[in-house]
Amino acid sequence: MRALLPGVAVGLLLLGGCSAMGDALKFEDVKPWQRGVLAQDDMQLVPDAMESYADDHLYFSKEAATGGKGVGGGGCGCN
Amino acid sequence: MENLRSRLALASCALLAQHNGLAQTSVDNDWVVDSSLLQYTESDDRVAVTKLVASVDGNVSTKDSVSLQLVYDTMSGATPTGLISDPASIETVTGVSGGEFATGSGAGVTLAEFDDTRLAAKLDWSHQYNRTFAVTYGTAVSVENDYQSIGASANFAKDTASRLTTFNAGIAATFDTVSRTGGKTPLPRSNLADPESEIFVDEARRNTMEALVGFSRVINSRTIAQMNVTLGLSDGYHTDPYKLVSVADSDRRPRGAVYESRPESRERHSIYTKLAHQLRDGNILHLSYRYYDDDWDVVSNTLEFKYHRKLERGSFIEPNIRLYDQTEAFFYTHFLDSATSDASDIDTIPEFVSADYRLDGMQSYTIGFKYGTPVLSGGRLRFRASYVAQTYDDTEFDEHDAVVLQLSFRNVFQ
């Protein structure tokens, strides 16, 4: 079951991702007055700072790999 | 008549200029307060963490903003020591982060109980030097019984003239002090059963430098993408002062134990990419991928996907999945073979050795959802639940899972 769930998820992800990719990767010259969607909270690269901070700390504590999103911030011993 | 028109035009210009002048000196003084309560619970009564986070962000002038974040963690439960189980003696002792640690052979002590609290604070100040260039200066401090960390950072953001692309660069320095509870730190590879107790030194230190370059790019009116490349260099005591390695015979019977030993430096690299895209129906996809490697031979891939589905009246639901894998560190071992290693003779112990499950090869996934809804005026309440499962290649505990529950509330004060 544990092996199956990620497999199904990747399948769905690729399916959804591919169909959306065509739209997503079409380059356009976007004027300032055309950025209403991009200004929405949920379109930000870090849309939920509380969730992002908690996840970063959780995975930093439990996995060997860390970082990538930014630099700075305190460390911890982490059990 | 012409003269009157000129005067009216001049008066209008003067009024507009005055208005602009006022606009430039007034502060857009929205303050954003965000707060969160998180409960992390591992199965089998392992680690439990309660995390409280609060932050406040606001403008202090037309060009300056500040952000303050405070964190309070309580951590308790039992964590693997790295030792293998001894069928003759399976027990749990208090040890990590806030208690007495068992001495003696350590055989059979696969879990160590702990109880600790952590306080952390982070203060960022951002200054907009001109229309397209801003710098964020940050400081951070984190304190717990056996670990102190202090750091500083600077992050630079430069927009192109069209503001479609933002180039980012960042640098950070972190200074950590590591010890066991009580301020003593074991010498790597020393024998757990050493009766002389000469195996402890004072607090150990580790310094870390991180650097980042990257950019974010508006691809179209509904898509933004980001890429970062980061480098991390750390130097000093990387050993976990609580982790042990068993020495066992061919029948897996423990013959002793030593404190683990990790290299005194680490070089990490990562490439992180992210895409946020609003679909034509208004719902939003977030997709990210990170490649990571380091000079401990850990190579990792992380893929994360979120689907933000809008509901009625500003509410939303957001299912998400995260997939992660990593290879083992070059010095990871389940246990040492007593045919070649003797806990009482440090010369027979490899220079670098660890049985910390986090350095083993691992596959992990997280699956969860978040629900959010507007509350009050300008507020938003979010609740999320996630299930985390990890599977290891060769550790004492083959699998491990946890549940994360988080309740957050954000409000904008205008």
Image (tube, coloured by chain):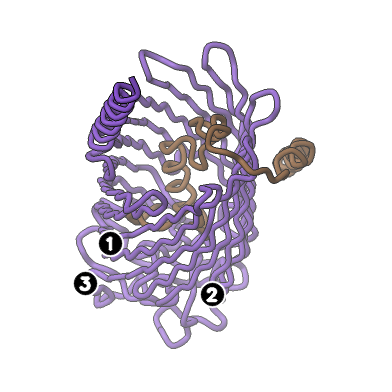
Measure the alpha-carbon separation of dots 1 and 3.
Answer: 9 Å
How many numbered callouts?
A: 3
When the figure is inspected, residue B10 is found, relative to residue B236, above or below; the finding is above
Callout 3: chain: B
- Find disc 1 in the rendering and name its residue: B180
- Find disc 2 in the rendering and name its residue: B295
- Tell me residue B5's x, y (percent): 34, 23
Tag 1, which secondary structure?
loop
Give the chain coloured brown.
Answer: A
- Tell me residue A30's x, y (percent): 61, 40
Identity, as a three-letter code, of the amino acid under mark 3? Asp
* Badge 1 density bin: few <14, some 14–19, many ≥20, Cα 10 Å: many
Q: Are marks 2 and 1 in contact (CB under 8 Å)?
A: no
Identity, as a three-letter code, of the amino acid under mark 2? Asp
Res A27 label: none
Tag 2, which secondary structure?
loop
- Find disc 3 in the rendering and name its residue: B202
